[in-house]
Image: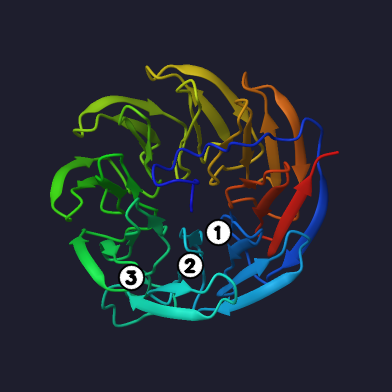
Amino acid sequence: MFRFDPRHRGRSPYLLPKQKPDVLWTVETSAPVTSSPTLSASGLVLVGSHSGKLFATSADGKLAWLFAAGDMIWSTPAIAADGTVYVGSDDDNLYALDGKSGKPYWKVRIGSCSQTVGIGPEATRCDVDAGPTIGPDGTLYTGGDGIYAINATGTLRWRFPTGAHVSSAPAVAADGTVIAGSQDNSIYALAPDGRKQWEFRARDDVESSPSIEEDGTIYIGSDDNRLYALSPQGQLLWAFTTGDDIRASAAIGHDGTVFIGSYDGLLYAIRRDGTLSWAFRTGDRIQASALVDAAGAVLVGSQDDRIYALEPDGKLRWSVELGGDVDSSPTLGPDGTIYVGSDDGKLYALRGR
């Protein structure tokens, strides 16, 4: 699922290539790819496209199956333990698909917006571009005109209304608490039954997905330029200010260092106490969320059309130029292959020498 697990820490158990990788293959999707790739246990690579299609390719880049939704796909597909694939679309539906064939099992309409496709407030309020996140018990969490919990059978468990669109994937803490941000400037903590436990107000939209550390600390960014560290009870521990909006989600290293990109073009490494460890400048805005590998190296994409691999101390290991903005958060395979989408409409597979 997005950021690999329900707590969205962005940690990969695999290692990034030491040397600059080459493009192994690409898959053309005919529209920008901001969805992040997901790897299945059977070796498929799944990614959504603004063409409204979900692509499933084999490890050699050959198309295994294709699913067409009714509008753009921004969301990252999630794969359940039984192989079921879940993906949301801007047609206001959450879909459950057979992971082997792509045939739909069911779909659930999120919200009751009168306009389900297109642009404008009413057309986008119920878009399903948040997650989905699969909880430990198989419950699906997503957003639209509120925060939703959906049973694996496709029935509604509960809905929590928010004041504006929920565009980023909810996270699930170890105790089952659901954390989600909204474009109404708020960060919500909900009990497993959907009751509100607390609410924290930022100063602008919250379109960053929360990341939750082992001790329960919550890291989440906002369009008010700040990365917030909140206690499990919703108390402010500290706020780190960047030079522009934070739409990316934080990656949390094994030593507790928090890595977050900003629209100011910088990737920040922030210590547990909220002080800056280092910053790395890219050539444009960073919307993609960073990945931390098993040894502490960091991988991140930028709207300067590049992906960057950085050493744990922030020094550049290598970078690769792709054909468009890299707003898709990268995924790392067991053999070190990197999978990432680009605004040039392609899914890329890169492998080191």
Instruction: List the residue tagged with mark 1.
Output: 35
Instruction: List the residue tagged with mark 3.
Output: 126
Instruction: List the residue tagged with mark 2.
Output: 84
Query: In the displayed structure, would residue 167 be above or below residue 54?
Result: above
Q: CA distance from mark 2 to mark 3?
A: 23 Å
| 13 on left or right of 17 | left
Q: Secondary structure at mark 2?
A: loop
Could you classify mark 1 by the number of other residues whose Cα lies within 10 Å: few (under 14), some (14-19), or many (20 or more)?
Answer: many
Tell which tag, 2 or 3, sits nearer the viewer. Answer: 2
Q: Residue at x 57, y 24 (%)?
A: 279
| 249 on left or right of 236 | right
Tell me the amino acid under the disc marked 3: Cys
Give the quadrant of residue 140. bottom left
Whether residue 117 can be seen here: no
Tell me the amino acid under the disc marked 1: Ser
Could you classify mark 3 by the number of other residues whose Cα lies within 10 Å: few (under 14), some (14-19), or many (20 or more)?
Answer: many
Give the quadrant of residue 319. top right
Numbered disc total: 3
Provide residue 176's location: percent of width, then percent of height: 26, 45
Could you classify mark 2 by the number of other residues whose Cα lies within 10 Å: few (under 14), some (14-19), or many (20 or more)?
Answer: some
**Earlier-in-chain disc, 2 versus 3:** 2
Query: In the displayed structure, would residue 27 be above or below residue 327?
Result: below
**Earlier-in-chain disc, 3 versus 1:** 1
